[in-house]
Each structure stands twice: as structure tokens, then as C-alpha cells.
Amino acid sequence: MEPTKTETLVACPVCGLQNLTNFMDLNDYSISQEPFKIVQCDNCTFLFTNPRPKSEYIGPYYESEVYISHSNSSKGLINNIYKQVRHYTIAKKVALMMRLVDGKRTILDYGCGTGEFLNVMQLNKWQARGIEPSEQARKQAIDNYKLEITSPETIYNLEKGQFSIITMWHVMEHIHQLNETMAQLRSLLSEKGKMVIAVPNAESKDAQIYGKYWGGWDVPRHLYHFTQKTVEKLLEKHQLKVVDVKPMVFDSFYVSLLSEKYKTGSMNPVKAFWNGLRTNIAGVQKVNNYTSLIYIVEKM
Ligand SMILES: [Zn+2]
């Protein structure tokens, strides 16, 4: 990669200190196959991809054309599982929103993709709004579901304090302007509002099992690799606090399938299922073993 297309952070995005240690050398096993590094802050333990593609050059790493052209039966399997599970997980997410809301039913989904979750919220009479960087995904969501969806820079024009719920489903690990975005999202939240943040868990059981092949690293698309501790540190910096932590149990199976593929070249569904199950069993004992965690967050 040309050096101008990447940027190297000299300080930890969470605590600002400059003592960084190499944590892992790994590749982008899903799209580019290029090598990347994850570093760890000596002070607060935060893990992040460094160097990383600049935001204006990260687009090609999201394009799965290469991946699709090499498609095979295992790719079909994973898509199928993904679609079936999505239906169920959207219903679970909507039920969670109903439990959490205190006041007006207004929601902002930051990184809403093609809008499937927001569409169901809208059908449930919520006032729904989405933010999505991909123009193609935005267009699809607007055409299919008549949703109000705009690009990330528009968060700075929205009226403060208007949302009872702000969701980020596997999004916070992708944001270049992490601190600016979190500060702005906090300001858009109502006084009793809740943020719901789902991210992969870098300390999970399957991250330990698969090492550098773990699907949750997903470099360079994942710029940050959160743990419970570092999520709390980041949020605290923005006067936000975690009030509850919940698992996403299906992620364990999905991520294990990806991890098997990266490690061995094929999905090994039986082995992946077993490792997904092991991860969830470990999670029942200790929440920090789950593949992905959902943080329920309030203003301090
Ligand atoms: Zn730090």
C-alpha cells in the first residue's frame, strides 16, 4: 500500500497517551489479503489497527467483489444462515428497544446499512432516522422502506436531545472520527435516553481459540478492537456510563464460521458450530467470554 493512503496514530484514541506496543500481526483475510497491525496502549489497554487506511481510502476494503467472484457453496451457506438469523435478531432488537424506551419513541440508528432494523421500528410507529456512509446502502434503504437516511456529517445539523434511543449495531469499531462522533451522538440523546452499542469482544473465548484468524478482528475495516474495560473508558470520557451488558449469541456461530474459513480455507461447519457453542457456554459463566456484546448506555 502507498504510504499516503494510510495514517499512523501516534496517540491512543481513548486516553491520549503515546506508549503503544505491537499486539498482533495479521492479514485482511476476507477482502484484500494485505497485512495489518494491531497495537495496544500500554496505559489503558485499548487495541486499535495502526497504521490504518485513511477514511477517504478505506472504501475499496469494503468492496466484496473479489470475494463474491470466488464464491462457492460455503459462501452460500453463510449467507443463508445470516439471512435466517437476521429475521430473529431484528425481532429481538425491536423488543429490546420497547423495553428501554422512556418517553417519545424516537430512534437514530447510526450505521443503519440497508435499513432492515429501522424499517421494522418504523412499522412499529417509531419516529426513525438513520445515518449511513455508503451511498448505495442509503439509496436502497430509502427506495425500499421510505426511511429518512443521511450521511455521517449530517449528525452535526440535527436538533440536540431529540432521540430517546441511539443504536450502533457493529458500527463503533468502524468510525475514523471516533471521539467527535461519540460526543455529537451524546448531544443528540434526550436526558433519559439510552445508547445501545454492539461491538465484537476482543477478549472473547473464540478470539482466544482462533488467534489472528478470529473473524472479529476484521482489519482494516475494524479500526478498534474493544473489550468491556476499553468500552467503559471511552464512554466515560464522553460522560456516558454502561448500565447493562448483554450478549449476541448468534454472532459466536457466524464469527466461528468466518474464523474457520480464514484459518483453514473452508468453513468446517461442524467445527465452527462446536467452537461457537463453546464460546456461548463460556459466556454463560462470564459475560466477557461472548463473541459480541451489547452495551446499554446512559448519560452520566
Ligand atoms: Zn490508551
Image (cartoon, helix red, strand yellow):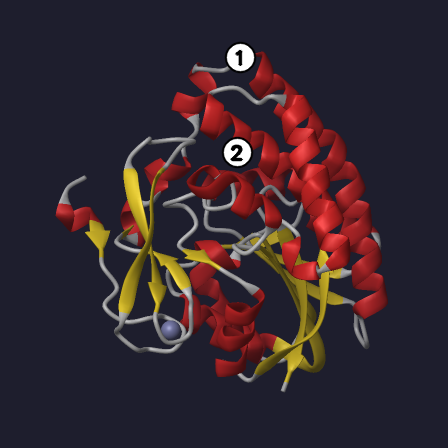
Residue located 52% across and 34% down the image: 259
Note whether residue 145 is visible: no
Residue labelled 1 has its Cβ within 8 Å of some atom of ligand 1: no
Asked if residue 181 lies left or right of residue 195, the reply is: left
Q: Residue shown at 59%/12% (left/top)?
A: 73
Sequence-wise first label, 1 or 2: 1
Q: Secondary structure at mark 2?
A: helix
* 119 in relation to 191, above or below: above
Q: Quadrant of ligand 1?
A: bottom left
Q: How many marks?
A: 2
Q: Nearer the viewer, mark 1 or mark 2?
A: 2
Residues marked 1 and 2 touching at CB (< 8 Å): no
Which residue does the image show at 54% across and 71% down from the upper left?
229
Q: Nearer the viewer, residue 77 or 152?
A: 77
Disc 1 crowd, CA 10 A, few/some/many (<14, 14-19, 20+): few
What residue would you read off at disc 1? Answer: 72
With 113 as the anchor, is 53 left or right in this view? left
In the displayed image of the protein, which residue is found farthest to the top?
73
Q: Position of residue 109 (x, y in %)?
A: 62, 58
Bin the neighbour count of mark 2 within 10 Å (Cα to Cα): few under 14, some 14-19, many 20 and up: many
Q: Residue at x 42, y 69 (%)?
A: 45
Measure how far apart labels 1 and 2 are at the Cα level.
17 Å
Amino acid of disc 1: Asn
Identity of the amino acid at label 2? Ser
Which label was assigned to residue 259?
2
Q: Position of residue 144 (x, y in %)?
A: 66, 37
Would you identify the image quadrant in which residue 213 lies?
top left
Whether disc 2's CB lies below 8 Å from ligand 1 is answered no
As helix, strand or loop, the secondary structure at mark 1 comes to loop
Residue 101 position within the rendered picture, expressed as x and y whole percent measured from the top left? 80, 70
Question: Residue 34: x percent and y percent?
Answer: 29, 35
Residue 1, above or below 70: below
